[in-house]
Image: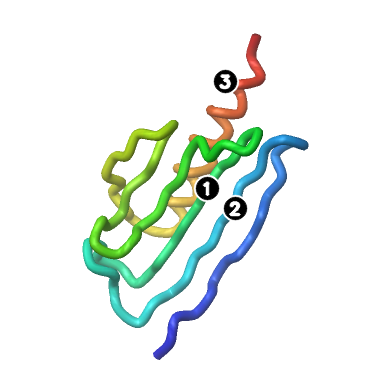
Amino acid sequence: MRATLLVRDRIAYADDAFAEIVVWQVPKSLPGSTHSYKYRLAFVLRGDCLVRFDNEAGKGDHRHLRGREAAYRFTGLDRLFTDFEREARRLLNEDRDP
């Protein structure tokens, strides 16, 4: 089985903010992960990536938030999308509040 692209999407939040979401189903889990997905979800505001969830080989599931990296407990795609959306909206609202 080859990797299968499940999602490739770019979502505009505002003129200066967007999310890019890419998810692949892979034949076997990547080193450091226990599931059959390879993913990258990024939220970009004014050209800066403020939050990214990904699972690069060897590092496993993790997220980057304003330049800091932390482990992420992957429990499924629905939860991943929910967690990412919550972080993106929170950062966008922080930026927009005076």
Q: Position of residue 24 (x, y in %)?
A: 47, 71
Depth check: give the residue in front, 42 or 88: 42
The amino acid sitting under disc 1 is Ala
Image x and y of residue 22, in percent: 53, 62
Disc 2 secondary structure class: strand
Which residue is situated farthest in the bottom direction here?
1
Q: Residues within 10 Å of mark 3 (few under 14, many from 20)?
A: few
Q: Is residue 59 above or below residue 48?
A: below
Say which residue label 1 marks.
Answer: 42
Marks 2 and 1 sit apart, C-alpha to C-alpha, by 5 Å
Q: CA distance from mark 3 to mark 2?
A: 20 Å
Q: Is residue 33 above or below residue 84?
A: below
In this rendered view, identify the residue nearer to me: 93 or 42: 42
Q: Residues within 10 Å of mark 2 (few under 14, many from 20)?
A: some
Which quarter of the rendered picture does the C terminus lie within?
top right
Q: Earlier in the sequence, mark 3 or mark 2?
A: 2
Q: Which mark is residue 20?
A: 2
Residue displayed at 54% across by 42% down: 85
Residue 70 on image: x %, y %? 29, 40
Pointer 2 and pointer 1: residues touching (CB < 8 Å)?
yes
Helix, strand or loop for disc 3: helix
Residue at mark 3: 94
Q: In the rendered structure, which disc, 2 or 1, sits on the residue that comes first in sequence?
A: 2
Taking depth in this image into account, of 73 and 18 the one nearest to the observer is 18
C-alpha separation, residue under disc 1 versus residue under disc 3:
17 Å
- Where is residue 78 drawn, in percent x and y? 47, 55
Residue 12 appears left or right of 71:
right
